[in-house]
Amino acid sequence: MSEFSGVQLPEFDTMTMKHTETANRLEELAQVLHRELLSAGLDTSPAARLRQLAGRVTTQAEDLRRRQNLVHELQRQKVTFGRSTPAGSFLEIPDNLEAANGLLDGTLAARAALKAADGDAKALTELEKYASRAGDAEFVKAFLGALGACGVTRLPGSLAAQLHDARRRQNAELVTQLSDQGKKVLAMLSTALAAGTDPKNPAYTGADFLNDLVKEGRTQHTSGDTTYSGYQAQALIWRAHDGNPPFSKEFIELVGRDVIVYEHEQRNDQWAAARDPLGRFVTGKQLPLIDLAGALGLGTLLRPEMSASSPGMKTPSSVVDDLFHAAKSSREASQALLNHTPTGWTESVLDYLLTTRWGASHFLNDYKPIRDMLVIATTGQDPTSKELAAAMTKILADEVRAAFGKAADGNLELRNRDLFDRYAPLSYPLGRAIAANIDQLSRLLLNHATFGNVAAQDMSYALALATADDAAFEALVRAQTEHMRAALDTVPPVGLDASNAERLGFTEADVKAYDFDGDGRVDKADIKQFLTDRTVAEARPFGHIMEIRRQILIAQGLDDKKADEALKTMVGNALGLLPVPGSRQAGQLAIGAFGELVGKGYDKLAGTAYDEVAKQVAQRMSEYGRDLDQAHRTLADNRLAVERLAEQMLATAILNKGLLDGLGQGKQSFTAGSPRTVKSFAGMTPEEYSQLLAWTRESGGSSDLLDRFRSTFRRTSEVDDYLGLQIPSSPGSGE
């Protein structure tokens, strides 16, 4: 056994006793020597050194006594075992006390768990005492090793069966007791299982244990008169997980993937019949494999996050939904499940879940686990996240396309409301996935590129589904705002030339590219041209999002002529005011204007994904910019809100790039100091901010830029083309 030592127990006891006696004698000798040397007027340092030696031996003796006590307890509990050799019988004990304690407590906890699985109420109470040890690696290894995959499976099965029996007998007191105990035990099991099945965790129990979980999951088990599959019981553990530590991709690769295949094997015939027109009438809806709590009608009695005060609450979950809950604890685990095609299948798990199996998810209305998992798996900046985001966008665009058509007035209509409602629960994760890859929208519209297999028309139908969700729509607008902010920041500052290019983060090649008139210096005319180009380019994806949002509101019979509260808040908080993280304020008037708004690690966000930057910007501006822009009070619709955000961003870009330098000599209310600079935005009043925007329009050229943004932004021809519409023109639409 690794990290273990072998001892002969009688000899170990003798050694411990003699070590203790030696320590005592050394201490006595040190005291006597000290007295003798002191009385003789000699140096007492030899006695001091002897006392130090006695102290070390005493410490060793105390450690040996602790080990001795543990050895005797391990032997008494029959936790460890002897080994016979030609030299005698040896007892194996851990080399450190933590491991010994973990071995002892883990084994005792496993024994209590096995007894509890057999219905022993006292053992269940005993097991609760070890709940706090579930994060201890040595404990977990011993606990899972002694419990085994069979015990891990039987325990939740027994808990559910006992609860079911108590409810059947209408024993309310016992129901409450078992519910409370069951939640704690399942939470303990989930923590231990996540740690013990992760190769990166010191508690890892090995691949054999994972394979045993699969074997037990596919096996039929019995508790009393209740028969269930192992996965139905294991699922209760997964649903009890609090996310820490996360389940590993190795757990998902072995156990999770098999769960998907197992349910398909169990339900495939019934699902095929349910999809057939005649079979649908006879067999009904697409039923998933329900977990054991749901099968026994226990509602939320074994859900740690739910109160047992509502024993009649009926919220069953499927085994696969519980798996999603476990998988969402890490991006790697979520992706390991979704980015996989089982042997013999022609579709990936992601495709299968969103098409073939979606009716089963729809049956229970338990959407949170899959929504959370999809968000985790598709919103990273790693290649797999992007691949999954593109795949989900294409799948859902194809699935929902037939729900839409052109109404008599040329606007969007819902031709198949049932189909739209069927996929509406996926609007939010779809919106988040697109927001995390918002740069792809510009590539699709401006460059006619593709995002995986997604073309511009696919993205348009996907946006019709995504923008139907308020929170998804907000995430998209915030991400596109950051994309526009970043695009405007690529414009060079006034005065860029070969002498200062490196200091300002540019190259000599950049100077030549931005210097339209060829005088060796980037002047205001050059900057305005580049700002115009960037503004027009950003207006197109912004307009695409906003018009499709307007169309889906019209199609649902909702009010498209009011501003969403989220957008009004963004305008009021002056969300467009901040510069890009890491940007350099080249304009002299901008010195000190952003102050604490860009302090406290703001520049560390440089290079972060647009949707993540959007979250940080929203947090900062909600603290410092509340109601700075009073225009939010009178916004009539979402398009006006976005135009105001664009004006905020253009004003900041113009100020930052130095287009206003030399124009701020007057004593405007929004400037201070000598020479005059713009006041800190954090301390600026709404009236002063409004005057700054007005001055920027009049003196800095933002009025022309805003006109170019507005005329492009309100153009609906691309939405017409991609969604097959003929949107009626409206005032200021650009048509």
Image (cartoon, rainbow, N blue to C red):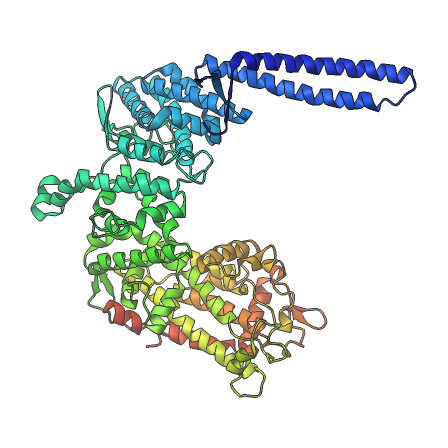
Indicate the quadrant where residue 666 lies: bottom right
Frontmost residue, 256 versus 408: 256
Residue 361 visible here: yes
Residue 633 vertical position relative to residue 703 in the rendered view, above or below = above
Q: Quick check: 118 left or right of 508?
A: left
Q: Quick check: 52 left or right of 213?
A: right
Frontmost residue, 332 versus 428: 332
What is the residue that sits farthest to the left in this orientation? 278
Q: Residue at x 18, y 40 (%)?
A: 265
Frontmost residue, 30 versus 405: 30
Q: Position of residue 110 (x, y in %)?
A: 40, 22
Q: Position of residue 665 (x, y in %)?
A: 67, 77
Q: Position of residue 361 (x, y in %)?
A: 25, 44
Q: Position of residue 607 (x, y in %)?
A: 50, 61
Q: Quick check: 536 left or right of 31?
A: left
Q: Residue at x 53, y 61 (%)?
A: 606
Residue 324 visible here: no
What is the residue that sits farthest to the front in this orientation? 86
Indicate the quadrant where residue 621 lies: bottom right
Name the quarter where the C terminus is drawn: bottom left
Q: Quick check: 279 left or right of 478?
A: left
Name the quarter where the N terminus is drawn: top left
Residue 475 vertical position relative to residue 176 in the rendered view, above or below = below
